[in-house]
Amino acid sequence: MLFESVTAAIGHTPLVRVPLGAAGGVEVHLKLEFQNLYGMKDRVARNIIMEARRRGTLAEGAPIIESSSGTMALGVALVGTSLGHHVHIVTDPRIDRITLAKLRALGCDVHIVAAMTSGGWQSARLELLHRLRAELPGAFWPDQYENPDNPAAYRTLAAELTADLGAFDILVGSVGSGGSLCGTARALKETLPGLTVIGVDSVGSVLFGQPDRPGRRQSGLGNSLLPGNLDRRLIDEVHWLNDREALTATHELARELQMFAGNTSGSVYRIVKHVAAAARPGTRIVGILPDRGDRYVDTIYDDDYWAAQELDALPRSTAPVTIAPRAGEVAESWSRAADIERSERGQRLLFVESNTTGTGMLALGLTREFGLRPVLLTHDPDRYRGLAETGAEVVTCDTNAEAELRRAILGAFRREQIAGITTTSDFYLSTTARLAAWLGLPGSPIEAVARCRDKSRTRERLAGAGVRQPRFAVVTAGQDDAETDARTAGAVARTGLPCVVKPVDDSGSHHVLLCTTPGEAAAQVRLILAEETNVRGQRTAGAALIEEHLAGPEFSVETVNHRGRTHVLGIVEKHLTAAPYFVEHRHVFPAPLSAATADRITDTVRRSLDAVGLTDGAAHTEVRLTPDGPAVIEINGRPAGGMIPELVRLTTGLRMQEQQLRIALGRAPHPVPPPDGFAAIQFLLTGRPGTLSRVDGVEAARAVEGVRQVTVTAVPGQRVQPPRDAYHRLGYVIARGGSAEEATAACAKAHAELNVVIEETS
C-alpha cells in the first residue's frame, strides 16, 4: 500500500483472527495497533495536530509541548517534527531508554521531572509543562487527556474494524486517557448499539472509583487523575489487573501468539482470553492491542527487574473476583465490576445561544424533564427574557469565537457530563454542528448544516437534485459600486423581474426585499454587501442572493430527522405583510390543505432534506405553492421560531422542543399524533415609527373566547417602526378553535382590542 507521507501511513493496522475460543464457536480478533510506526497514539497525535493547524490554534512552525512517558510522546514527535514543529516532551524517570533514544533521534527536547508531586508523576509533569508554556509563547499543548480530538481520532480505527469485520459483539480495550476505548466505542455504537464494551484498568488507578497508588509499574493505562476524555457511560464492564498479572499476561501474549508487545496489549489479551472462554457460541470479540514490546526490554522482559521490584510477591489470580467500587471495595488483584460510577447524575445538555422568540427558553426549561441540567453558553445572558426561570446554568463566553467556546466547555465539564449539544438560533447552527462533531455527539454532518446556513449553497444543492425552486443568482462585491451594479444587472437578467433580494446567511427576513426594477435590486445588493456583521456580531458571508419571485401561498413544513429518516410534524400556513417586505404576521396550524396537496408539499420537503444531507435534527422548510407545484424557498436547520411550536402543542400535544432535544440526545422522536383542532398566532405590529409608550387592551384581548396567550414583547421606551423584518414585531396573540376560521377570527378579535400607543419622532 503506497502512502504519500509518513503521517498518511498512520492507521491501516492489521486485524488478526486468533484461535482463542474457536472450539466453542467464538471468534476472537486482535487489532494490532502497535503496528503503527510508534504505536496507537500515532492516530491521536495526527488528529490533534492536524485539527489544531486547521483551526489556527497551532501556527506554522510553532513549538509543541506534550506530557507523556510513552507512545503519545512518540506520536507527537512523529507528526509534529514531520510538519516542521519543534517538539518538547515532558516526561518522568519511568521513561524507558528506547523511547528516550527515539525522541532524541527525532530532534525533540526531552524534559524529565525529578520527583512526584501531590498527584503523582502526572501532576509533576503538568506543572513543568505549564512553566514551559509560559516560556514559549505560541506553544501548542495537545493535552491528550482533555482534548476531544483524542477520542475523535479513533473514528478511523472504528471504521477499519467495521470495514474488515462488519458487526461484532464485544470490544475490549485498555483505558488511560480515555481516548482510545471511548472514541472507538462511541463511533462503533452509532451502528452497533448492542456492542458490549469492556475496559481494562490497573490496580491502583482512580479511573473507575479506586484509590490512587502512584507507584504503579504499568504504563499506558490507568491514571492518577480523572481525564476529561473518559466517558464511563460507554463502558459496560471494567477489569483491573495488578502489576504482576498484567506483566505476566504480556509474557503469555508473546509465547502463545508470538506478539512482542507492551503491558497494555498484554492486559487486554488476558481479558480477551477470559471473555472468549465464557462467551456464547457465535460471539465475535475484538481486542485492541496498543503498544509494542521494545520499550519494555529493561522492565517487563528483564528477570532482574522482576526480582528488584519483587513482582512475584504480589497476588496473582487466575479468574476475576467481582467487586463493588461504589460500596468502597478495592481491587488488589484481578477484579471486575459492571456497577461503576458513570456520572449518570449531573449530565448536561448544552445550548449554544438561543433564539429570542421565547421557544428557546422553553427548550431550556424542558431539559430537566430528561433528568439533565440545561446549560446556556452565551455572550450576553441579558439578551434572553425568562432565562432565570429556566433554571439553566449559564456559561458566559465569546460564542462567536469557536476556540473560546471549546475552552469554556473543556473548563466546565468532563466529556461524560455532556449528554448533547444543540441550539435554537440560526446564527449558531454551524458552530453547534462543529462542536457536536468535535465532542462525538449526535448531529447532522457539518457540511449539511453549512449548506442550509448559506442559502446559495442550498440553491445549488437543490438544483442538482432537481427540486423545484426559484431561479437564482449570487452577487458578491466588485472592485467598485459600478462593477457590483453590473453583476447585479446580470443576475437580474437571469432571474427576471420582479425579484427577491436577500442576504445568503441572515435570518428573520432581515434585508429581504421584493424589487421591481434593476435599480432597486442594485441598491438592495449594495445595502446587503455593506453590512459586515449580523445582529449577533458575526461576520456576514458578503454575498447577496437574487431570486425569481414566485407567486402563491406560503407554507412551512416542520420536521425532525433521526438517522437520516424524516419525520413530518406538520404544515403551517403563513401570511405575510404586503410587498416589498416579507414579514410573517400570522400563522395557522395545521394548514387547511387537502391531503393530496399536503402530500405534494411534504414529498418536496423530504427530497430537499435528503438533497442537502440533514440527517439528525430539526428543520423548518419554507415552501411556496405555485401553479406548477410546491417550490422550496428556504431550509432552516433548526426548529421553527415565531411561536409555531406553541401552535403545534395546542393542537397535537406534541412539543417540538422536546423532539429537538430527543434528537440532540441521540433518541428517536415521539410519534406525531393527529391534530385536534386548529391554532393561530397573529403578531402585533405598528404602522408608524416612534417610541413605544404602552400597549393598551391586553386584559380585554385575553378575555376573548378561544384566546390562549396575549404577550407583548416590546417594552416602553423602545424604538419601533413599521415591520421590515421579524425583529420589528411587538408581541402576539395565540388562539385555538375547531376550525382554521375560528382560530384566526379569535386572533383578529383579540388583536383588535390591542392599542399600540406611540410617541412619534419629531
Image: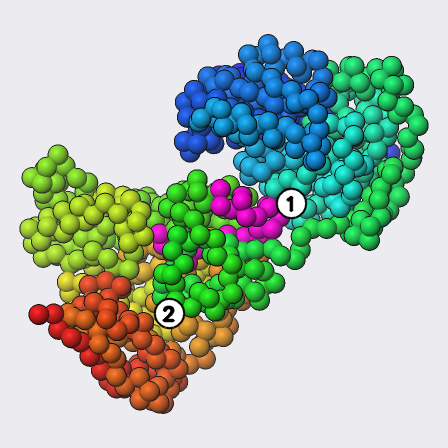
Depth order, front residue of 121/545 = 121
Give the residue drawn at x 12%, y 56%.
Answer: 515
The amino acid sitting under disc 2 is Met
745 and 313: which one is in front? Answer: 313
Tell me: 184 left or right of 505. right
For label 1, the crowd category at 10 Å Cα-Cα, with few meaning under 14, some 14 to 19 and many 20 or more, is: many
Which residue appears at 69% of the width and 31% of the height? 117
Left or right of residue 371, residue 566 in this image: left
**What residue sits right under mark 1 in the picture?**
231
Q: Give the magenta-colored segment's residue range.
A: 407-427
* Residue 666 in picture, x, y percent from top left: 56, 54
Q: Is residue 408 magenta?
A: yes
Image height check: is 466 above or below 690?
above
- Colour setup of the view: rainbow
Tags 1 and 2 in contact by the CB under 8 Å rule? no
**Between residues 191 and 324, which one lies in front from this camera angle?**
324
Q: Residue at x 64, y 45 (%)?
A: 231
Residue, disc 2: 643
Residue type at the position of mark 1: Asp
Give percent across and percent down for residue 436.
50, 46
Report how far apart the C-alphas of labels 1 and 2 lie in the structure.
37 Å
